Amino acid sequence: MGPKDALALLKGIDTVIAAKGKRIVRFDLKKDKPAHADLLKAIIGPSGNLRAPTWRRGKTLVVGFHEDAYKDVLGT
């Protein structure tokens, strides 16, 4: 999924949590209105496609793997 489709995936999402290595970036799409370039930098990988794994829970989109982020979203 390329950048254009990845941005369309954000429809109905309030929070994006993007994990890159040991770093977690959170975007509050309702409050902060981040620039598309900032969002794409966090969710698009070096291949030019949406980073994996990517999953949605309610109005939260999680991109990449970070154990603490998963625990936070899943409540475990």
Image (cartoon, grey):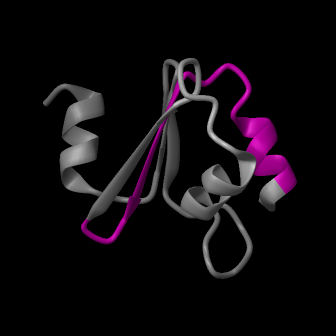
Residue under the point 58% across and 18% down: 30
In this rendering, position of residue 9 left or right of residue 67:
right
Above or below, 41 relative to 16: below
What is the x, y in percent for residue 13? 61, 24
Residue under the point 53% across and 50% down: 54
Residue under the point 71% across and 56% down: 37
Residue 69 falls inside the magenta stretch: no
Closer to the camera in the image, 27 or 60: 27
Count of numbered circles on the image: 0
What is the x, y in percent for residue 69? 27, 44
In this rendering, position of residue 30 left or right of residue 72:
right
Residue under the point 73% across and 37% down: 9
Residue at far bottom of view: 46
Residue at far right of view: 4
What is the x, y in percent for residue 57? 46, 26
Above or below, 32 relative to 24: above
Screen quadrant of the C terminus: top left
Closer to the camera in the image, 24 or 75: 24
In this picture, which residue range is highlighted in magenta?
4-22
Q: Quadrant of residue 12?
A: top right
What is the x, y in percent for residue 55? 51, 42
